[in-house]
Amino acid sequence: MNGFGCQSMYAPIRCMALKHPRQAFISQANLEAQWKSLAYFGCPSFENSLAEYEKFSDILEQFDFEIYYAPIDEATSLDSIYAHDPLVISERGAILCSMGKAARAPEPAAAEKYLQEMGVPVIGRITGNGKLEGGDVLWVGERALAVGQGFRTNAEGLRQLRDLLEDSVGEIFPVQLPYWTGPQDCLHLLSFISIVDEDLAVVYSRLMPVPFREWLLERGFNFVEVPDEEYDSLGCNVLAVAPRKCVMLEGNPVTKKRLEEAGAQVWTYQGKDISLKGTGGPTCLTRPIWRAG
């Protein structure tokens, strides 16, 4: 690998880590044993997961960036398919998170192993009472960061993150997250916002705290609004592989059209088993390691 650093949500991806369902889900028997305890909406089909993932990875591979597939790790759960959450990647290296969901606790250590293989330095980890998940970390600019605080990330996790980033970041905006559907479900900061260019974000405004929304408007952002009927189908979870080049789930036609009207190109995939049942869209499924351009 030729580089690392990911202080952007939209700069062109140069390298990405994924975890294939063969390594995360492993088998139908493993899915049936775990899905209820992980609060999935249904038991995924292993065979259909493989088929969906093949089409998803085909979309990513056309952009010609390096893709690294994480190996199986028996300590991790089905949730490890959502490779975004256990890491934060800065210009200096990786920070290992401390997961707010107990079943995901082994994931940062598993990620550390493949980071070593990729040659990405680990500059620190969230420890003690600190909790931090990558889904709560939003790069708004190369030196500006928004961090959600809720059931998965706490104030101590944010304090440690600030210390570890040192001068890699100038401003951190804490975003207080609502109770929403409670601690058993997942509401990350990235559950209601995806930044797809320097001045464009896909948002579900009903969940946005007013100070955070106003902060983004002051920074010059325009919003693609997700309608109510497309929030549960993960219409707000959009991966930018480059500025205004977006990957999202099928079944969100209004959001897709609004993105296109804002000048974006959009690729879609079917994700009944790899995304909807575990509530993890394309951003959750991917861990960009290097964005540059």
Image (spheres, helix red, strand yellow):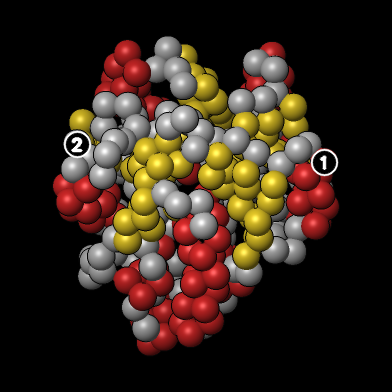
Q: How many other residues sit within 10 Å of disc 1, few (<14), some (14-19) or many (≥20)?
A: few
Q: Amino acid at mark 2?
A: Pro
Residue under the point 53% across and 44% down: 241
Residue under the point 74% across and 27% down: 222
Q: How many other residues sit within 10 Å of disc 2, few (<14), some (14-19) or many (≥20)?
A: some
Question: In the rendered image, is residue 290 in sight?
Answer: yes
**Viewer-proximal residue, 168 or 85?**
168
**Viewer-proximal residue, 147 or 52?**
52
Residue 243 image point, x, y percent: 60, 35
Q: Is residue 28 left or right of residue 69?
A: right
Quadrant holding the N terminus: top left
**Viewer-proximal residue, 58 or 222?**
58
Instruction: Classify mark 2: helix, strand or loop.
Output: loop
* Label pair 1/2, CB-CB below 8 angstroms: no
Residue at image mark 1: 261
Residue at image mark 2: 121
Q: Is residue 212 left or right of residue 184?
A: right
Residue 264 image point, x, y percent: 71, 42
Residue under the point 66% across and 60% down: 268
For marks 1 and 2 on the same chain, the one whose residue lies earlier in the sequence: 2
- Which quarter of the picture shows residue 205? top right
Give the number of marks. 2
**Viewer-proximal residue, 118 or 238?**
118
